[in-house]
Amino acid sequence: MTRIGKYLVTIVSLGLLACAAQAEPLRVAMLMADEGSVYRAFAISFAMETERKNLALNISQTDALPANADLIVAVGIKSATIALNSNVPVLSVLVSKAGFEKLLHDLPAQREKNTFSAIYLDQPSKRQLDLITAALPEAKNIGLLYSVPSPEIAGLRKAATESRLVLHEQKVDSADSLHRDLQSLLQKSNVLLAVPDAQIYNSTTMRNILLATYHSGVPLVGLSAPYVRAGALCAVFSTPDQIAAQAADATRQLVETGRLPMVQYPAEFEVMVNQQVARSLGIQIKEPAALIRQIKAAANAGGAK
Amino acid sequence: MLLSALWLCTQPCQAEEVGISEDSFFQELPVVLTASRLRQPMAETPSAMTVIDRKMIEASGFRTVPELMRLVPGMYVGFADANRPVVSFHGSSDELARRMQVLIDGRSIYLPPHGGVSWADLPLLTEDIERIEVVRGPSSASHGTNSFYGVINIITRDALAQNGGSVSVTRGFASDASARFGSVGEQFDYRFSVGYRSDQGLDNSVLNDHNLTTLANFRGNYHPNTTDSLEVQTGSSNGVYGLGILDVNLHNGLSRPEDPFRDTKAQSDFQQLTWSHAWTGNDETKLTFSHTTHDSFDPNICINSRICQGLQSSIFLNPGEKVTDGFTKQAVKSERNELELQNTTQLSESNRLVWGGEVRRDYADYPLLLVIPHTINAWQVFAHDEWHITSAAVFNVGTMFESNGMGHQNNSPRAALNYHFTPQHTMRMGISTATRSPVMSEAFIAANNTILGGGYVPPQTPLMPEKVLSKEIGYLGEFRSVGITVDARAYIDQVSNLVWWDKFVLLTPPNFPDSFANLFSAEYKGVDASVKYHWNEGRSFLVANYAYQQATASLGNLPTQYYNATPDPIDPVTYSSIGDRVRQFYQVEYLGHFSQFVPKNSVSLLVSQNIADTWQFSAGYYYREAMRVGDVSPDVTMEGTMRRLDLRLAKTFKLEKGRNVEIVAVVQNATQDKYTKYGTINEVANVLFTRRGWLTANLNF
């Protein structure tokens, strides 16, 4: 009996193993509710990354909630909102931290947090401040303009204190007061740090904001490559490729452990510098590669503490 | 109210709450700081440059642009009477100094008949100036025609620099008032200024030099989309300027007959329209049209000195002559239309080309000087390339080719290499050339009257354009950690075909009528240096400028009059022949004096200290060695050494909502150094620049 029992256990185990080895590839549904070249770039890059990492996946694309999937990769906040009603693990990418956190409030209570994860677009507060320290070692006063207080600002506040920087916050109440508020903020600041606040920073306001900062000799640190091309001094950001690689790693973790990682900031990042603006403002700024090295060194030093 | 309503629905209307959407990270943005908007850093400019920024303008206490030029190493600032400012470089210091380009927002403001600038009636408030960039050296490739000894480039404040209003009142020696208002919108920004400036001049009992200029100025910028913007500027000024001087030799309280007390008037207007378009990839096109007019009116100008002296005594009058025959009214009109196309092309990451062209029409009606109205149609094309060969080497090369509308075509190339030995230390080596075409008053002068002391005939040989070749070596040190920048250079400027007042162009006694001729070759050598030191996070600063200058001249080809052997009909004892008279005059009055046309040493110092956030104290010290104003009648004595101290104290009272009141006290020439202001007549009449002061109240809301 015991012998038979052992046998059975062995057979079942073997069977299970065989099952696992020959299991259907993980069905990944790319939920793309939004059109846009960035989203498409992510999708292509994700497919390539998973292939490079030898993950056997069955990737499909959809713009609505998929019927059968083992993982939904929700691209953009609109997709993430749709994925809220699924019952399979969801990894949201290309979403802002504020947008995703807002979504979490609507998450059904029974749902475990780590089955609804994300990789933010936002850079961690410390990384943004480390960029400022690396690019502008003499800048101690950082100006921040916002229309609605956000957790992001609280994070920056904490990181600034730790980096011995002074954060000057200015709330803007209306479009009419934007310019005046900016002017008074620029008087106190050595650098203006852009936050993801579309009321303040959009293609309409950008002209006046950049001209005002330039006239005051206060550089703007932007959020993305377009900021830098428009006239910001520099920006730290993560490309769709970098986020796709991180998403591939998260998928592997799901395959291997059955669980998605917790919500993450982007691991890899780029730094872009507008040398023409730097020269014109009389700023001697390092090359992007050197800035990235310095930011990573600062992150390691911070982690070791 | 309307704008407030729009506030919640500006860009991503679909995202109801801020930060929900990821648009902030992906949105495309217009290229705002295009290459043409960016200032070239000092360490990369092809010529020596002085920048006078807003902080310096305020700290100096100066009310006018000409006075601000004291902060430029080697620049001469004087006043032909207190109300006719003179700004010049390299000893070209007559009242209508005409060898510099002067631009306001790219619009050339030297006047067609004389090529000089009527500084007094500039339709611009000093408060509306953002900064002034002064190029000390020829710069035709970048700044166009007339950029001969240098360029004064006045950049006014962007419409968006004035959001809200401000009112300013000055009382004391000066009596000024201004009101400015501006608004910044999503598609349209504008600023509007009105004001007047006036002062009593030097000494109204001797010199009638009171002045009052009222002006209005508007700048609006419409930017309907992310790539195009349309800028409109317009301004107008009206001024009343006293003229006339007391005859101090006669002690009878009467004015000099040929220069009676009277009020002249001047009016200046401009309109400027600029369309700029940003192409993808940082390229930009800019099309500018400007229209400028300047009219002046003298109600009672002497055209015959002898008859005018009838004011003193009838013995000067021939039978049947009336004193009024010696006087007339003079109206001078001038107009300029200019159309310029400028393209900035980013050839590669390290190479940028600015190229374009301009057509210009100048018109002047100046009957007493030019007899008939003249129009000149000129055009030019230019290209200037800035190439970062390596991260350490910047090569600037360019040229301007022009047709001056008077039958000459000129090419004015320039090249300079800036090498950063380290980010702190930069050397600059440059060679540049420029051409100055004769202005109307030189080329077309023909006046059978004595408004300038004699009869005038047109040039006997057609005037050639003046040429300058400038060689320069400079050093720029930027030590940011200690807040110090150093800028020093040595230069040699060689000028050929220099157009000068020829007193003996025709040897027809007794008048020996005057005209202009390409008389000299000249050489200017010098060393100058500027040091800036900033502390207190840039709120306090010190600027020190020093210039050492030397000028020499030689007669190009000896004029044929030189060899005229006819006995001198007037003074055969002193002069062995007419040729001898001519020789002596050229040798003594021109060549002998030429070295005195520049001050050998000059210094300016400006220090500004912020105290407790609301107080600001500044002091300016200006030193200039004795010199002689060139191009005026030779019997004028030298201008004495100037040692002048100006003080300024400002207190700001902060009110709620960012409003503030500022009270400013300014004292000029605080130590009462009684230097003369300009070498023409002031010293003869003993009119001195004395201590003066005023109080200003500014309200910003």
Image: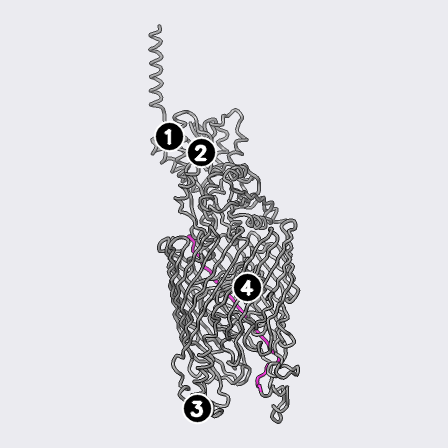
Residue identifier under label 2: A303
Spatial CA span between label 1 and label 3: 113 Å
Image quadrant holding the N terminus of chain A, namely top left
The spot of residue A3 in percent (x, y) is 33, 7
Q: Residues within 10 Å of mark 2 (few under 14, many from 20)?
A: few
The type of residue carrying mark 1 is Asn
Q: Chain of mark 1?
A: A
The reply to whether discs 4 and 1 touch (Cβ–Cβ < 8 Å) is no
What chain letter is assigned to the residue under label 2?
A: A
Q: Is disc 1 surrounded by few (<14), some (14 to 19) or many (20+) residues within 10 Å?
A: some
Q: Which mark is residue B576?
A: 3
Q: Which residue type carries mark 3?
A: Ser
Q: Which secondary structure lies at badge 4? A: strand
Distance, label 4 to label 2, CA atoms, is 55 Å
Q: Amino acid at mark 4?
A: Tyr
The residue mark sitting in front, 4 or 2, is: 4
Please report contact status of discs 4 and 2: CB closer than 8 Å, yes or no: no
- Dot 3 falls on a residue whose secondary structure is loop
In the rendered image, residue A172, in percent from the top left (x then y), is placed at: 59, 45
Per the image, the residue denoted by label 1 is A58
Q: Is residue B593 above or below residue B59?
A: below
Q: Residue at x 33, y 23 (%)?
A: A22
The residue tagged 4 is B621
